[in-house]
Amino acid sequence: MLDLSGIVGDSIVDGPGIRTTVFSQGCPHHCPGCHNPETWAFGCGTQMEEETILDIVRSNPLCRGVTFSGGEPFVQAAGFAKLARLLKEKGYEVASYSGYTFEQLLTGTPEQQELLSTIDVLIDGPFLMAEKTLEAAFRGSRNQRIIDVPKSLAAGAAVCITSGRWQGEY
């Protein structure tokens, strides 16, 4: 069961192509200038089963990818890992935003490590107002990286995606 602030279908701003974005409720980071401060409070979202979310995603035949946003998905890591596994079984690309860095998640809780191992792409790091940009594809600030998670886990270090569709090239 996940505590969500919402689900947006037909998103074109949270990754390449038409995606569904699942917004977690609750965030410990409280980044100044956050795009979604209404997601900071814990325990006040809508409770939803992972299978129900999968059904919502599958109801859009144009959707090929799902992005977890927030709030902070890695605070509800076990539930989001379950959802990611269900999505991957159906052939969806799974990405997640996180205010944590890849390195923090790599040494995080077992649940955070499990979620990390189930996603394809991580956009990591807190939003920093001093680094704000409207020019970086799918990121709010220049410090945030777009990371190929399977390659990074194999390498034991962050491997950034520097070209292609995740950089806005189609």
Image (spheres, rainbow, N blue to C red):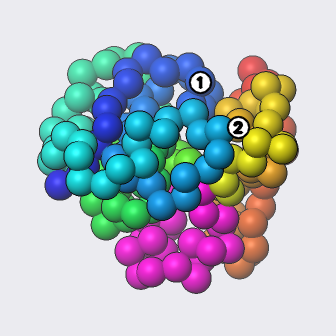
Residue 21 x %, y %: 43, 33
The residue at 19%/33% (across/down) is: 55
Compared with 54, 112 (above or below) is below
Q: Quadrant of the C terminus?
A: top right
Determine the secondary structure under disc 2: loop
Q: Residues within 10 Å of mark 2 (few under 14, many from 20)?
A: many
Q: Quadrant of the N terminus?
A: bottom left
Compared with 153, 142 (above or below) is above
Q: Nearer the viewer, residue 78 or 3?
A: 3
Instruction: Please give the label number shown on residue 139.
Output: 2
In the picture of the structure, the residue carrying the numbered disc 1 is 13
The residue at 74%/48% (across/down) is: 128
Three-letter code, disc 1: Val
Q: Which residues are magenta?
A: 99-119
Left/right of residue 132 with respect to residue 28 in the rendered view? right
Q: Residues within 10 Å of mark 1 (few under 14, many from 20)?
A: some
